Amino acid sequence: TKTGAIGATFTQLLNEKSYLKTVVALSGTNVLLSDDTVSTSLLPKTYRLVNSKESRLSLQTYYSNRINDKLTMKAGLFAHRIGFDILQQERDTISDLLSDQVRVKESTGLFQGFAQAQYKLSPKLTLLGGFHATFLALNNTWSIDPRLALKYNVNQKSTLSFAYGLHSRTLPWGTYFTLTPPTSSLALPNLDLEMIKSHHLVLSYDYAISDALSIKSEVYYQHLFDAPVSNVLGYETYSPLNDRDRFSTVALISEGTGRNMGLDVVVERSFRNGWFAMMSGSFFNSTYVATDGQRYNTRFNSGWGTTTMGAKEFTLGKQKASALQVGARFTANGGLRSTPLDDALSAAAQAPIEIASRAFEDQAPAFVRLDLRFAYRRNRPNLAWWLALDVQNVTARTNINPYRTTWDPVEQKLVEDVQSGLIP
């Protein structure tokens, strides 16, 4: 992955209570994914390629006005010119040739606007309301999303909040330009897809145990609609909601739904006396409804996840001009989901063949990883330098990668892949 950005900001103070801020930015990204293997004659072979380039020129301007001690208003406009150059290919198991699934060089405009007002109903209760609008020139789709939130300061240490919002987002650019059938047709069946929309409900509670220690908890519910799903025979359970690093390869319709719900808890000790720590935990359920009317787990429905991280800094020397840093990060989750494979059909095709009617029934074993970091920093009046060593998966645990199961032509069987071991 390559990325770069440059920008400029201009702020104009209109008076003591209002200002106008404008931002101009130019950014670009290039993501190249290539899955390679060797043939039975030990020759290198690419069986899947995704090369995605995107450039974005953005103009953003917004106005803020603190009308009085109780009421503050903000409004803004955003205009983006987006260019993208995308190539996605996959090798056909029968012809053994790479065929185009997405090939496009195009540009479009994305325009957004928002307006919001914050009003203090009382010293403890604050109301925030507004809307966010989006228009995509590529296919003339648009959405106006209302937002509303209430924040109640229970006391000096705790806050209770409730929020509702409708949120819309465009699809990955390559999905709009899926070729069906690959390379043999200029038809673009996905060009007119709607934006994915989601109703969000969030109830949160924050509590400051002390000046350095706090706990944050959040219960949420999301209902997705206008989600892309396939009604193509044999692909009735497919939805790009489950895609990870590639674009859709089949025709889609905007008639799918989804549901996410869960609980997040974060305990944080801010940096004081040379150390910090944070622990987070999540319990959740993530599902979608396909065109066959059935509800399925999403690929990402691992059920739970947790992360614990912390670091300690030791100052060195009489002048305290250098420091030794020691940190650790522990990550675990219930394991991502995958669709069961048909052994007989996989053997006949010499490639993994999924049982589409059982979408994401299987779940990988729990993912567990411990990372360590050691760093030395030296500060001088006109120069600072540091040296660091990062060790990922320090226990060398074997974590299954459920998305990289392959067919071994020598052993004549399906072979599971594993994720990276210890990486210094």
Image (cartoon, rainbow, N blue to C red):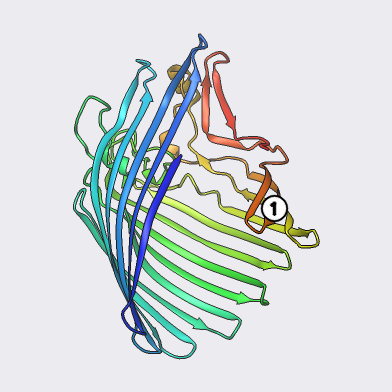
Residue 230 visible? The answer is: no
* Residue 262 relative to residue 269: left or right: left
Q: Nearer the viewer, residue 100 or 104?
A: 104
Quarter of the picture holding the C terminus: top right
Please provide percent x and percent y for residue 195. Answer: 29, 53
Q: Which residue occupies 18% across, 53% down? A: 140
Q: Quadrant of residue 162?
A: bottom left
Q: Quadrant of residue 363?
A: top right
Residue 293 visible? The answer is: yes
Q: Nearer the viewer, residue 371 or 27?
A: 27
Q: Nearer the viewer, residue 220 or 117?
A: 117
| Helix, strand or loop under label 1 | strand
Q: Which residue occupies 42% across, 34% down? A: 32
Q: Which residue occupies 24% across, 44% down? A: 107
Please provide percent x and percent y for residue 236. Answer: 34, 39
Considering only vertical position in the picture, is 248 above or below 284? above
Q: Nearer the viewer, residue 391 or 366?
A: 391
Please provide percent x and percent y for residue 128. Answer: 38, 78
Residue, disc 1: 377
Residue type at tag 1 = Arg
Give the tally of numbered discs. Answer: 1
Q: Residues within 10 Å of mark 1 (few under 14, many from 20)?
A: some
Q: Residue furthest right?
A: 318
Considering only vertical position in the picture, is 61 above or below 233? below
* Residue 385 relative to residue 262: left or right: right
* Residue 281 relative to residue 179: left or right: right
Q: Residue furthest front?
A: 382
